[in-house]
Image (cartoon, helix red, strand yellow):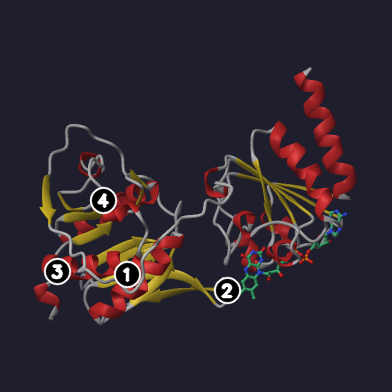
Amino acid sequence: MTEKAHKGVLVYAEHNKGIIHKVSYELLGKGRELAEKLGAPLYAIILGPKDIDIKELIYRGADKVFYIEDDVFNKPEEMLYKINLVEAIKDIKPEICLIGATTFGRSLAPRVASALGTGLTADCTELEIDDSDKLIQIRPAFSDNILAHIHTVTYPQMATIRYKEFFEAKRDINREGEIVKKQGIIPETRLVEILEEIKGDGIDITEAEVVVAGGRGIKTPEDLKLLKELADLLGGMIGASRDLVDQGYISSDYQVGYSGHRVKPKLYIACGISGAPQHLAGMRDSELIIAINTDPSAPIFNIADYGIVGDLYEVVPMFIEKLKRQES
Ligand code: FAD
């Protein structure tokens, strides 16, 4: 299809058992900006069970919401989502399609792009419209050393965007929009069917307001208790560099960084973390960064708001003691 056959910006609204993921609101915020520059409508599409609060997507900026309603979408079956999303996109013909780079979105987006025969830029950190109304997809490349500006020459121009990259669209309960219900395509035989979901420990480090993260400066898995004590006192969670995860000290649910989770807490305390680009990619946007490291030349100090050159085994207990004294 040619460029002219495509119009509008489409945001894929992710949900978990009917609860809309906040990344959807972030994409609607950025999507609105892009749609206005293009003079085009902003669409959202959601594949979900009955009784999702669809209007919320309109309050957050969508002009039209396509709702493929079926309880089967309570389960994150990518193949089923893919079939339905691909057919819907063929119908809607948006010029831009945005998907959150969540665990699910990262699995879904390439399947959809491939089925549509279009390109996909993963993990964008910024999106712009150029003078010829094409989408510029900006993302770090070569270990964050350059910011690549990428054009997709096929349509729709598809991108995934990391959670917490953009601000959520403001909520306006007076906004009006259209809700279009679409019939789901549920094949009788499915290549993949989820029979059982096994719950992890339910932690979501991306939502933490305080993260106390440990790196290779931590000598044994038991020593993570020290960081946990500090995190608990601050009402936060612990995080980890990939090295700690690779050593089996802690599960990947806690990994911060390029191949882990991206966090944007109010406070990030990096304990014994050198500050490799792949780690910084996941935490550099934290509001306040405190780094504790014995090596004064550790790169983490280049981005830290406060740097403490010292042994974490001495500094962290001092923090804990001070906080405990304040509490009592
Ligand atoms: P190190 O680099 O070994 O640093 C340990 C630091 O602790 C040193 O600076 C040292 O001075 C300090 N230290 C030692 N003892 C103490 C003490 N007692 N008190 C205070 N400081 C002390 N890494 C991630 O973290 N997240 C990712 O998502 C990620 N993704 C990656 C993806 C790819 C494709 C690749 C190639 C790598 C990735 N990495 C990732 C790995 C990354 O390159 C680094 O190897 C890793 O971040 C280093 O972890 P670290 O800082 O804990 O360890």
Identify residue for label 3: 93
| Residue 102 visible in the current orientation | yes
Q: How many residues crowd mark 2 within 10 Å: few (<14), some (14–19), many (20+)? A: few
Q: Mark 2: which amino acid? A: Asn
**320, above or below 181, in the image:** above
Mark 3 vs mark 2: give the one in front: 3
Q: Earlier in the sequence, mark 4 or mark 2?
A: 4
Identify residue for label 4: 71
User: Marks 1 and 4: in contact by CB < 8 Å?
Assistant: no
Split into quadrants, the picture shows ligand 1 in the one at bottom right
Q: How many residues crowd mark 4 within 10 Å: few (<14), some (14–19), many (20+)? A: some
Q: How many residues crowd mark 1 within 10 Å: few (<14), some (14–19), many (20+)? A: some
Image quadrant in which you'd find residue 277: bottom right
Q: Earlier in the sequence, mark 1 or mark 3?
A: 1
Identify residue for label 1: 79
In x, y percent, where is residue 114?
A: 30, 80
Mark 1 element type = helix
Image quadrant in which you'd find residue 137: bottom left
Q: Mark 4: which amino acid? A: Asp
Q: Residue at x 24, y 44 (%)?
A: 57
**132, above or below 321, in the image:** below
In x, y percent, where is residue 126?
A: 40, 62
Identify residue for label 2: 145
Q: Mark 1: which amino acid? A: Met
Q: How many residues crowd mark 3 within 10 Å: few (<14), some (14–19), many (20+)? A: many
